[in-house]
C-alpha cells in the first residue's frame, strides 16, 4: 500500500479526496489546522467520519508549526489542499492569508524536498489567479489576481512549481468554483439553496449575470487523483466543470428544484470578485486524461436535510478524543 499526506483533510474538498484515496487503497495521513474560517464543527464532523477508517491517521495542527519531517516519513505523494479560502475576507485579513497560504506552502515544499520518500506534490491552486482575463482561461495566459487571496495562491503555486527538479515532481491544479455535498457555508450555491429552502430573501452581489465554471467535487477529486500518477510535472493544469453558468441561471434552477419562488435582493459587486470564469480543459484532457462527468445541477438534498435539522453530524466523543490524541 502507498502512503500519502493530505493537507486540509477535514475541509470540503480534502475530506472527499481523503475518502476516495482510502477507497482506492491508500494509507492516508490527514493534517488540518481546524481554523475558524467557518464553523469548525463541520470540519470536526468530517474528521470524525474519516477517523473511523483504520488506514487514516489525523494530525491536528498548523503546517507552519507541525513536525513535517516526521509526518513525511514513508509518504510518497503529498496532496496539498490546506489554505485559507475566500476572496472578500482576504482584504482585511492579509496576514492570516499570507501565513496559511504562502508560509505554510513554503515550509511544506522545503520539507518535501528534504524527504527521501516524497516523489510528487499535487497542489490545489485556484482560478482566482486569472483575475478578469478573457474566457476561457488558458494556463499559458498571463495571471493577474485582483485579491489578496488570489495573490497568495499565486505565490504558493510558484513555490510549488519551482520545486519541480526531477527527483521531486510537482503539479498545480487550478480548481474552478467547486460545489457538491458538504460544501462550505460561505460558498454561493449553498447560501442560495439554504435561502431558497427557507423562503428567505436571497442577497446577490451584482446584477446576477456574472458567471462561474461550477465544478462538482467528485470531478475535482478525480482530477486530483489522476494528477498523482499522470506524466505531467512542473506546470499548472485547469480543472473545471466544462460549462459556464450565470448566478441568475443557478437561481432559476433552485426555483425549479425547490418549487419555491426565490426573492432576490441585489447588492453592490464585492471587491475582488471577478466577472466570469471558464476553464480551457485542453491540458487537463491531454495530460491528465480528465473529463468532467457531472453536468452542472444544484444538488439540494443535503442542504434540504440540513435545513430540516436532520443531517447535522456532530463530531461526538469519539471524534473529539481522536483529535486530542492526534494533537
Image: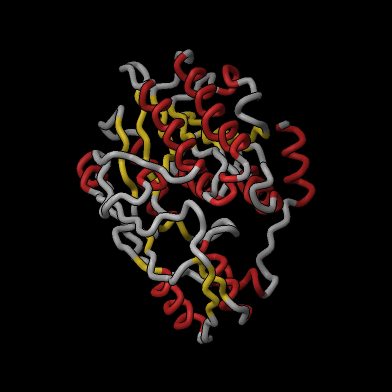
Q: Is residue 45 left or right of residue 275?
A: right
Q: Is residue 296 left or right of residue 32?
A: left
Q: Is residue 10 left or right of residue 13?
A: right
Q: Which sits in the foreground, 87 or 293? A: 87
Identified at 59% across, 38% down, the residue is 94
Identified at 20% across, 42% down, the residue is 286
- Could you tell me residue 45's position as x and y percent? 67, 51
The quadrant holding residue 158 is top left
Identified at 48% across, 69% down, the residue is 299
- Could you tell me residue 292's position as x and y percent? 31, 56
Report if residue 32 is visible in the image: yes
Identified at 51% across, 41% down, the residue is 148
Q: Which sits in the foreground, 8 or 313? A: 8
Q: Is residue 42 above or below residue 163?
A: below
Report if residue 56 is visible in the image: no
Q: Is residue 165 above or below residue 144?
A: above
- The quarter in which the C terminus is drawn is top right
The quadrant holding residue 192 is bottom right
Q: How many marks?
A: 0
Q: Which sits in the foreground, 224 or 123? A: 123
Amino acid at each position: 500500500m502507498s502512503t500519502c499526506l493530505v493537507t486540509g483533510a477535514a475541509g470540503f474538498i480534502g475530506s472527499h479526496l481523503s475518502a476516495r484515496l482510502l477507497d482506492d487503497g491508500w494509507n492516508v495521513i490527514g493534517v488540518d489546522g481546524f481554523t475558524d474560517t467557518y464553523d469548525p464543527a463541520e470540519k470536526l464532523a468530517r474528521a470524525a467520519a474519516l477517523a473511523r477508517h483504520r488506514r487514516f491517521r489525523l494530525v491536528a495542527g498548523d503546517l507552519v508549526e507541525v513536525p513535517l519531517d516526521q509526518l513525511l516519513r514513508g509518504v510518497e505523494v503529498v496532496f496539498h489542499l490546506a489554505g485559507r479560502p475566500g476572496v472578500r475576507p482576504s482584504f482585511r485579513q492579509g496576514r492570516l492569508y499570507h501565513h496559511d497560504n504562502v508560509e505554510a506552502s513554503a515550509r511544506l515544499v522545503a520539507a518535501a524536498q528534504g524527504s527521501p520518500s516524497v516523489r510528487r506534490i499535487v497542489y490545489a491552486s485556484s482560478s482566482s489567479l486569472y483575475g478578469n482575463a478573457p474566457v476561457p482561461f488558458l494556463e499559458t495566459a498571463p495571471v493577474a489576481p485582483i485579491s489578496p487571496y488570489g495573490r497568495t495562491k499565486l505565490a504558493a503555486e510558484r513555490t510549488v512549481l519551482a520545486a519541480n527538479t526531477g527527483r521531486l515532481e510537482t503539479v498545480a491544479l487550478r480548481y474552478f468554483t467547486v460545489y457538491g455535498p458538504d460544501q462550505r457555508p460561505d460558498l454561493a450555491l449553498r447560501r442560495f439553496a439554504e435561502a431558497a429552502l427557507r423562503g428567505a430573501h436571497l442577497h446577490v452581489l451584482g446584477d446576477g449575470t456574472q458567471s462561474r465554471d461550477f465544478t462538482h467535487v467528485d470531478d475535482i477529486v478525480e482530477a486530483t487523483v489522476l494528477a498523482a500518477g499522470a506524466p505531467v510535472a512542473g506546470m499548472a493544469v485547469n480543472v473545471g466543470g466544462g460549462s459556464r453558468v450565470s448566478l441568475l441561471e443557478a437561481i432559476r434552477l433552485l426555483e425549479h428544484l425547490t418549487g419555491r419562488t426565490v426573492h432576490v435582493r441585489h447588492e453592490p459587486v464585492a471587491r475582488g470578485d471577478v466577472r466570469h470564469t471558464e476553464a480551457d480543459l485542453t491540458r487537463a484532457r491531454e495530460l491528465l486524461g480528465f473529463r468532467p462527468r457531472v453536468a452542472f445541477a444544484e444538488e439540494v438534498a443535503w442542504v434540504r436535510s440540513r435545513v430540516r435539522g436532520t443531517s447535522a453530524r456532530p463530531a461526538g466523543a469519539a471524534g473529539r478524543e481522536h483529535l486530542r490524541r492526534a494533537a
